[in-house]
Image (cartoon, rainbow, N blue to C red):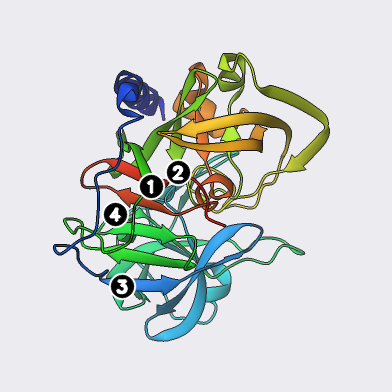
Amino acid sequence: MANWATSITGVILGVCVLTSCATTEAPIYGGPASQAPVAEAPYRMDYQGWLTVDAYVNGEGPHDFIVDSGATITAAFANLAGTQQFQPANREPIQILGLSGARALPAYEIGEISVSGVSLTDHVGVILPDWDPPARPPQGVLGLDLLSRYKPLISHDERTIKLYDPAAIPDHNMEGWTSAPLIPLYTDDESRPLYQTVINIRGAEIPCIVDLGASGTVFNVSALRRMTGGVHINSSRRRGIRTGTRIQGIFDNPDIAASINIARLQIGQASWLDRTVIVYDAQIFRDMGINRGPFCLLGADILADRSVMLDFQNERIFIERRRRG
């Protein structure tokens, strides 16, 4: 874990240098050269605020999988493993991170995981423990090992996730969209990065992991200190945190954190008004060295509010400026 701090800090500094790009407008997509998605899956908001899709595992299903851009690896929960014959994989354990720290979980040969015709084959992942009652666990987490192969577009109006070829010009109507940097965040022990962008709050630029697996947006205390206005501490509202992300909560260790009201936050030229977020210095933030400066997890409570596209190949996030309707 010690080497992670150096790697992550270097990337964060790189993002801050690139924040001048945050207001760059999205190119005009669509037109004669546009292409249809490779796959399109309906989603629903379930499990306390996660984007959830139907997945088939080794031909069986459908099973509920959380869409998690904060997870580098696709994983199964124990309740799904109980219906399958997953065999231990001949490799070292896989490290999974949560709010309360890291765990090395045994690797298993999960097999084929398919969503609307796109698949991970011969997949090796981990089995996550089910959440304690009364929490109802899903059956799996769909991570970046599948998502980053495509250009995912979450259509808020259509309630679908469209997966485009990475080099495709989407056929989706993107008039009135904006864009911002989507910068890979590498760690020393993983070849697949997480991705981060920049949130602007009253002039304070805060790098944030783009984390659809987080049902709430989480700022560290350093980020709170950087916010010079537009913030109201709501001491009467405290709530537990649980998310489906690799950074926090997959181990169902809810904790208590303060919630704050932010008058306005902005990504590119997309704005959100009067939003409630969480301030919490998670142990994993300290382990990774992120707590030394402002940082956050940008969760589904913000990202699922309107249509969003993650262009991993060109390292951009495209966002509908205003929620329709």
Amino acid carrying mark 2 in the image: Arg
Amino acid carrying mark 1 in the image: Gly
Position of residue 304 relative to residue 282, above or below, is: below
Where residue 75 appears, x then y in whole percent? 44, 62
Mark 2 closeness class: few <14, some 14–19, many ≥20 residues within 10 Å: many
Amino acid carrying mark 4 in the image: Ser
For residue 257, what is the image quadrant? top right
Q: Residue furthest bottom?
A: 60
Separation of marks 3 and 4 at Cα, in angstroms: 14 Å
**Among the two numbered marks 3 and 2 on one chain, the one whose residue lies closer to the N terminus:** 3
Amino acid carrying mark 3 in the image: Ala
Q: Residue furthest right?
A: 236
Mark 1–mark 2 contact, CB under 8 Å? yes
Q: In front of the other: label 4 or label 2?
A: 2
Q: What number is the disc on residue 148? A: 4
The residue singled out by tag 3 in the image is 39
Mark 3 closeness class: few <14, some 14–19, many ≥20 residues within 10 Å: some
Separation of marks 4 and 2 at Cα, in angstroms: 23 Å
Where residue 124 appears, x then y in whole percent? 33, 64
Figure quadrant of the C terminus: bottom right
Separation of marks 1 and 3 at Cα, in angstroms: 24 Å
Mark 4–mark 2 contact, CB under 8 Å? no
For residue 272, what is the image quadrant? top right
Q: In front of the other: label 3 or label 2?
A: 2
The residue singled out by tag 2 in the image is 321
- SS at badge 2: loop
Query: Which of 120 and 217 lies nearest the eye of the viewer?
Result: 217
Position of residue 200 relative to residue 38, above or below, is: above
Separation of marks 3 and 2 at Cα, in angstroms: 25 Å
**Among the two numbered marks 1 and 4 on one chain, the one whose residue lies closer to the N terminus:** 4
Figure quadrant of the N terminus: top left
Mark 3–mark 4 contact, CB under 8 Å? no
